[in-house]
Image (cartoon, helix red, strand yellow):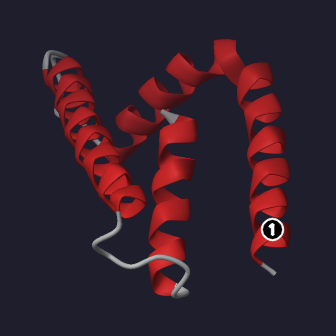
């Protein structure tokens, strides 16, 4: 999903900066991808909220933060590596368009 978000960002940036038109097949592909990512994010958010609402106490921002951190912590090294890769890709795209 991270790379999909990156592809969506690139497609948006290309239209905003006039590299491609909003009607181009490349942008349409990004639009379809944005639809899929948004739909997935919304449903996953509903899953998390459902999980939080199953608790015997009302959910709070703190309980959401705790749940998120518990889910993320086993993958901390992976996310660190992905952030570095994302930064490198972003730099490469920026360099290619300048």
- 10 Å neighbourhood of mark 1: few (<14), some, or many (≥20)? few
Residue found at the very far top of the displayed protein: 74
Left or right: where does residue 42 sit relative to residue 91? Answer: left
Q: In the figure, residue 92 lies in which quadrant? A: bottom right
Find disc 1 in the rendering and name its residue. Answer: 96
Left or right: where does residue 93 sit relative to residue 28? Answer: right
Question: Is 19 in front, or is 64?
Answer: 19
Q: Position of residue 20 (x, y in %)?
A: 47, 76
Residue at (14% x, 16% y) in the render? 54
Left or right: where does residue 20 sit relative to residue 76? Answer: left
Q: Position of residue 34 (x, y in %)?
A: 32, 50
Residue at (53% x, 74% y) in the render? 14
Question: Is 36 in front, or is 29?
Answer: 29
Q: Quadrant of the C terminus?
A: bottom right
Q: Secondary structure at mark 1?
A: helix
Q: Position of residue 55 (x, y in %)?
A: 19, 17
Vertical arrangement, residue 94 with respect to residue 46, above or below: below
Q: Position of residue 67 (x, y in %)?
A: 43, 25
Q: In the figure, residue 70 lies in which quadrant? A: top right
């Amino acid at each position: 999903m991270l790379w999909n978000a990156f592809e969506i960002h690139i497609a948006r940036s290309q239209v905003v900066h006039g590299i491609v038109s909003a009607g181009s097949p490349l942008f349409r592909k990004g639009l379809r991808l944005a639809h899929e990512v948004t739909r997935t994010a919304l449903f996953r958010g509903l899953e998390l909220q459902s999980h939080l609402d199953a608790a015997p106490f009302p959910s709070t921002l703190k309980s959401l933060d705790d749940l998120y951190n518990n889910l993320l912590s086993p993958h901390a090294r992976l996310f660190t590596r992905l952030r570095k890769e994302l930064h490198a890709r972003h730099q490469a795209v920026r360099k290619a368009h300048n």
